[in-house]
Amino acid sequence: MHATPTNAARGAHGIEAVLPTDEAAAALNRRPQTLRKWACLENGPIRPVRINGRLAWRVSDIQALLSGEVA
């Protein structure tokens, strides 16, 4: 179950903010390959969205993980 995005996690026009894998990994203090593995094996604490075949990570999910809301 995904956390409800906060207003800070939404960009202009109400579109949910996302980060590319490299930036999401840096925010989580993990290697990008770790996030790619979570996506491939579908066993990580958060799941990415795919945009034109590329992985993108919801800012709201990253915030929830960092605050301990996601185990």
Image: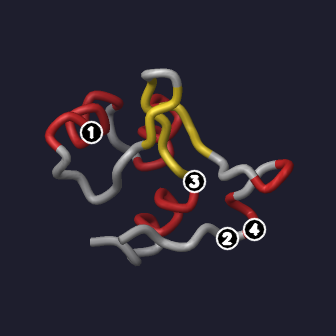
Residue 49 occupies quadrant: top left
Residue at 61% over, 67% down: 5
Q: Amino acid at mark 1?
A: Ala
- Tell me the CA gap for discs 2 and 4: 4 Å
Q: Which residue is mark 1?
A: 39
Q: Which residue is mark 2?
A: 6
Q: Secondary structure at mark 4?
A: helix
Q: Is residue 35 left or right of residue 10?
A: left
The label number, if any, that marks residue 59 in the structure image: 3
Please state the horizontal and vertical placement of residue 18, each as a whole percent of the image: 59, 43
The label number, if any, that marks residue 49 in the structure image: none
Q: Secondary structure at mark 2?
A: loop
Q: Earlier in the sequence, mark 1 or mark 3?
A: 1
Q: Is residue 10 left or right of residue 43?
A: right
Quick one: quadrant of the C terminus?
Answer: bottom left
The label number, if any, that marks residue 7 in the structure image: 4
For label 1, count other residues whose C-alpha is less than 10 Å away and answer few (under 14), some (14-19) or many (20+).
some
Q: Amino acid at mark 3?
A: Val
Residue at 42% over, 68% down: 2
The residue nearer to you, when weighing 40 against 63, is 40
Q: Is residue 29 above or below residue 52?
A: below
Quick one: quadrant of the N terminus?
Answer: bottom left
Residue at 34% over, 56% down: 46
For label 3, count other residues whose C-alpha is less than 10 Å away and answer few (under 14), some (14-19) or many (20+).
many
- Tell me the CA gap for discs 1 and 3: 16 Å
